[in-house]
């Protein structure tokens, strides 16, 4: 059964479709931290967890308060301080030397491996999916990177996220011991993920194709609970799945009021061709079929010559009924994550 139904409570006001930006959005600035440190980082996937909003980042080049480089943390999380200023954030925890604490921690064996001169990284583009009050899950890719930049991919893992009972500023993280998806399987949940009516919907890449799966909220840690969209139904065998997209590298799916009740599901992202073009689509069903429209070419702030990637939409920041949407994209290293407000052309 597909998720194709109008959402109750939406007003008749909507942006025109296919989407058109009223003007080229000018970057508001980088997603900044309250401490004033100028971090180079990527991803910037936002998510609501409990009553708060967070950004999850990938490789974060840490600096002390004097601006000196002190190390790389491969995944970090920052809390939005005030939703009225959606690119103003504060890291959950920073060590005394300036190294930002890792969001998804390494195991003892992984720390020993790092001490031998390799990097163990846990990257997630999918964000936290909240399945109960202040309890949720996040999916990550595990990669071991050697000194010669040889990369050994280990599959997709999952971690349970919760808020501390006595201090809701702290997040508890419990990683499942075994990997959920193997090295020869789709990277489900690491592209995008969301929760809807007792199910978690997950997208993942396999050979430059984006596949869709879902799992009941009670069984996200059980590999046998995942079902894959084959164009007609959700089936147990991922090899029967059909691609939702081809050649899309980054992006996020989300529920929105931008286009009214007929198109409640939206996607914002970019392709893998390094042209810095932000793509957008909206459909009645998460399963599609999806059609994407080029919206604009993203610009850099300090680093103008290279391409932009990691494009995502954040519907919590602005009023979709007015055609407004916060979007972000990444500059290549040593750049950071840029935020901009897009104003879509409204329909009649």
Image (tube, rainbow, N blue to C red):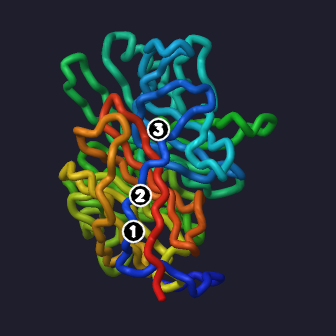
Residue that label 3 marks: 57
* Marked residue nearer the N-terminal end (3 or 1): 1
Residue 127 seen anywhere in this rendered image of the structure = yes
The part of the image, by quadrant, that contains residue 206 is bottom left
Residue that label 1 marks: 21
Q: Secondary structure at mark 3?
A: strand
Q: Secondary structure at mark 1?
A: loop
Mark pair 3, 1: CA separation: 27 Å
Residue 193 seen anywhere in this rendered image of the structure = no
Q: Is residue 113 left or right of residue 134?
A: left
Determine the residue positioned at 43% across, 49% down. Answer: 27
Q: Are marks 3 and 1 in contact (CB under 8 Å)?
A: no
Residue 262 on image: x %, y %: 48, 85
Determine the residue positioned at 41% across, 70% down. Answer: 22
Residue that label 2 marks: 25
Determine the residue positioned at 34% across, 55% down. Answer: 204
**Mark 1 Cα-neighbour bin, 10 Å: few <14, some 14–19, many ≥20:** some
Observer-side mark, 3 or 1, equals 1
Q: Is residue 271 above or below residue 32?
A: below
Determine the residue positioned at 46% across, 12% down. Answer: 68
Mark pair 3, 2: CA separation: 23 Å
């Amino acid at each position: 059964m597909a998720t194709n139904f109008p959402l109750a409570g939406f007003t008749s006001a909507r942006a025109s479709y296919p989407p058109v930006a009223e003007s080229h959005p000018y970057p508001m600035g980088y997603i900044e931290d309250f401490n004033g440190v100028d971090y180079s980082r990527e991803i910037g996937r936002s998510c609501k967890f409990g009553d708060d909003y967070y950004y999850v980042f990938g490789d974060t080049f840490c600096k002390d308060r004097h601006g000196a480089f002190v190390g790389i943390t491969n995944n970090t999380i920052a809390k939005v301080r005030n939703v009225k200023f959606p690119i103003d954030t504060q890291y959950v925890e920073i060590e005394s030397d300036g190294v930002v604490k890792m969001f998804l921690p390494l195991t003892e064996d992984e720390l020993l491996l790092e001490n031998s001169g390799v990097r163990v990284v846990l990257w997630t583009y999918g964000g936290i999916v909240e399945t109960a009050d202040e309890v949720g899950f996040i999916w990550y890719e595990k990669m071991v990177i050697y000194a010669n930049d040889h990369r050994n991919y280990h599959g997709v893992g999952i971690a349970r996220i919760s808020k501390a009972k006595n201090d809701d500023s702290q997040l508890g993280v419990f990683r499942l011991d075994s990997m959920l998806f193997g090295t020869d399987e789709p990277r489900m949940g690491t592209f995008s993920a969301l929760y809807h009516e007792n199910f978690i919907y997950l997208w993942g890449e396999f050979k430059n194709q984006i596949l869709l799966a879902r799992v009941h909220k009670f069984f996200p840690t059980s590999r046998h609970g995942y079902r894959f969209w084959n164009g007609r139904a959700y089936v147990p065998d991922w090899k029967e799945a059909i691609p939702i997209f081809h050649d899309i590298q980054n992006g996020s799916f989300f529920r929105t009021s931008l286009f009214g009740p007929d198109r409640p599901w939206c996607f914002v992202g970019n392709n893998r061709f390094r042209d810095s073009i932000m793509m957008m689509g909206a459909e009645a069903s998460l399963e599609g079929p999806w059609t994407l429209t080029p919206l604009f070419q993203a610009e850099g702030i300090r680093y103008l010559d290279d391409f932009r990637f990691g494009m995502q939409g954040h519907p919590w920041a602005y009023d979709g009924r007015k055609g407004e949407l916060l979007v972000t994209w990444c500059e290549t290293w040593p750049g950071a994550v840029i935020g901009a407000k897009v104003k879509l052309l409204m329909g009649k």
